Amino acid sequence: MNLHPHSAGRRSAASDWLVLILANTIWGSTDVVAKAAVEELSPSALAWLRLTIALAVFAPALWRRRAEIPRTLAGLLPFLALGASGFFLNFVLHYSGLTLAPASHATALRVSEASVIFLLSALLLRERIRPAAVLGLLAGTAGVFLILNLDFANLALFAGGYRFGDLLIMGGILVEGCYTIIGKRVLRTTRPFTATALACLCGWLLLTLFYAPKLAGEFVRQPPSLNALLAAAFLGLLATGFGYWMWYRVLARRESHQVGVTILVQPVVGIPLAALIFHDPLPLRFLLGAGLIAIGASLAIRSPVHE
């Protein structure tokens, strides 16, 4: 018998946050790894390799849990939505943006996903909206505008170049936020590993369906180098196999906006790493924007943990 339930609860909460911080530390480096990989691979090719390697890990365990896989189309639709938002659209948009924008931009803009998660949690999951949360969303939005360096007198600039890359990355962030919100509902009836593995499988199937001829031609013309394969392995094994599974494990017992706060770890890792490896410029406007996003996300999702 546990004589100290509150201590056990604190240990459980601490272990959850520790796991999420570790996952976000890994994710904080993924833009640097992916930026190097898309210099050789197309965005769809990198996404397909990443998911293929992740599925090699998920498949044996998923086969043993095949009784948990829904047998009807209605039962499979939520996992198709997870695969489309968390893996297919997210990766293709994000990696396409990385071909144009610096890795540091991708990591900084990724922080705004915390505010996206909060907003969708409030609207779709009926979580309570506090005045501080509204202020946080406004601050985060201002930070995004600073990083994007919007010029409303010349919006045609966003038709190409790194600014268009920023917009693609923001699109990926928006759909990835849906992955958390949809997942919160799915996890009411599905175990975290099964949900993650099925979502990964659906994302892989969508990528294969839409890009198979293109991928086959690309891999025949120029097989991936060892460096590209190592990058895909890191993204597939650690960022996807470990990171996405841990995200859902904690999400199954915590509120989505509480889980989202740990996204703030990513720029702490990714921005200095990008500056070190790619010599990405960090102008004052960029740093101020990243700071506003971090402050805004923190205000938006800060709330007490309920055991």
Image (tube, helix red, strand yellow):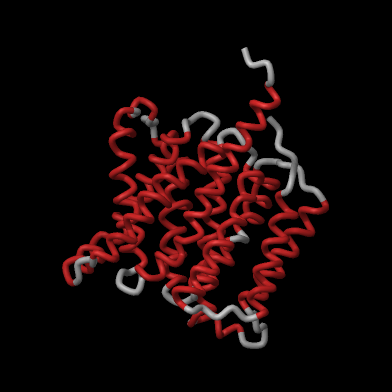
Q: Quadrant of the C terminus?
A: top right
**Residue 291 in picture, x, y percent from top left:** 69, 67
- In this view, the residue in front, 154 or 39, is 39
The residue depicted at 42 percent of the width and 69 percent of the height is 96
**Residue 241 in picture, x, y percent from top left:** 39, 45
Q: Is 196 left, or right, of 8 in this rendering?
A: left
The residue depicted at 46 percent of the width and 65 percent of the height is 31
Q: Is 275 left, or right, of 6 in this rendering?
A: left
Q: Quadrant of the N terminus?
A: top right
**Residue 89 in picture, x, y percent from top left:** 44, 58
Q: Is 54 left, or right, of 191 in this rendering?
A: left
In the image, residue 267 above or below residue 288: above
The image quadrant of residue 98 is: bottom left
- In this view, the residue in front, 245 or 159, is 245
**Residue 19 in picture, x, y percent from top left:** 53, 42
Q: Is 280 left, or right, of 215 in this rendering?
A: right
The residue depicted at 47 percent of the width and 51 percent of the height is 86
Q: Residue furthest left?
A: 220
Q: Residue furthest right?
A: 131
In the image, residue 164 above or below residue 266: below
- In this view, the residue in front, 62 or 124, is 62
